[in-house]
Amino acid sequence: MAISKDAVLITGASSGIGAGLAREFARRGRRVALVARRVEQLESLAAELCTAGGAASAHRGDVTVDGDIARVVAELAAQDITISIVIANAGFGVVGRAQDLAVPDFRRQFETNVFGVLRTLHETIGALRKSAGRFVIMGSVSGYLSVPGGAAYAMSKFAVRALAEALHGDLKAAGVGCTLISPGFVDSDIRRVDNRGGLHEHVDDPIPAWLRMKTAKAAKIMAHGILRGRREVVVTFHGKVIVFLARHLPRFTRFVLVRANRGSRPEPKHGAS
């Protein structure tokens, strides 16, 4: 299998959807640049992909730190590697009633999920202009529907959906495309990460297995949409239903959500402030 000379740069690539996308793009013969804070997991994944005949490199990077992604871009450029696709996947979810969360909880959520995406855009846009590439934002169906106990996360995903809508026009003159990925429940670590961004690997996923799409299947759908130049890819059947209801029956959807959550009290995840 011939390996593409250009690279797909993926943030938050150490596990979950990010790792799944890395495997899928490598399977399709694309070089992948893996970026995350957990270097050991990245190096293990890169070794796995290279052993299978792919081309992958591991880069420590934190989307909340100015210049980290720019450094990765420079490292790749020094090896004459062009970046054609950037997937801003790094993110986590803060849970809890809005009145019970502190302002720093919301700020922490936005620092990764919103400003982290913006940093990734600003620090890769030069490379994407040169390759006439594509910037991909990992959104969520929560970017269409905010549920009780999920205000902070939904606010961040509403924000990046708005960013994606603007980027379709803003990046057009630069020859750069934009794709928004809006998944429903997919196998990943996001529900094992606490409100401070700490991973609890041994915590069971609260979403039942029958409702979660396997990571590999979701990644295949996402990669196909990205390579086809789709403006948005909504993943999972229930995700498509949620987006449809939020778009066309918002009042009914809000009524159902409030009724379903009456009397419930969402508890913050481990490590919440």
Image (cartoon, rainbow, N blue to C red):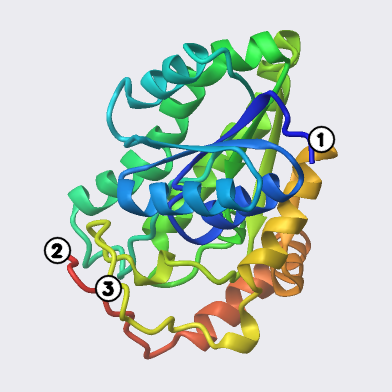
Q: Residue at x 37, y 19 (%)?
A: 71
Dot 2 surroundings within 10 Å: few (below 14), some, or many (20 or more)? few
Q: CA distance from mark 2 to mark 1?
A: 41 Å
From this view, report whether residue 53 is shown above or below residue 142.
above
Q: Which quadrant of the figure contains the C terminus?
A: bottom left
Q: CA distance from mark 3 to mark 1?
A: 36 Å
> In the displayed structure, does residue 258 sit left or right of residue 111?
right
Dot 3 surroundings within 10 Å: few (below 14), some, or many (20 or more)? some
Where residue 131 appears, as percent x and y from the top left, is 70, 14
Residue type at tag 1: Gly
Q: 256 or 9: nearer the eye?
A: 9
Query: What SS does tag 3 mark?
Result: loop
Query: What SS does tag 1 mark?
Result: loop
The answer to whether any part of residue 231 appears in the image is: no
Q: Residue at x 74, y 68 (%)?
A: 245
- Disc on res. 229: 1
- Disc on res. 269: 3
- Disc on res. 49: none
Where residue 84 appears, as percent x and y from the top left, is 67, 24
Q: Which quadrant of the figure contains the N terminus?
A: top right
Which residue was labeled with disc 2?
Answer: 273
Query: What SS does tag 2 mark?
Result: loop
Where residue 159 appears, as percent x and y from the top left, is 50, 41
From this view, report whether residue 210 is shown above or below residue 152.
below
Q: 49 or 70: nearer the eye?
A: 49
Q: 104 or 195: nearer the eye?
A: 195
The answer to whether any part of residue 95 appears in the image is: yes
Dot 1 surroundings within 10 Å: few (below 14), some, or many (20 or more)? some
Q: Earlier in the sequence, mark 3 or mark 1?
A: 1
Q: Residue at x 65, y 11 (%)?
A: 129
Residue type at tag 2: Ser
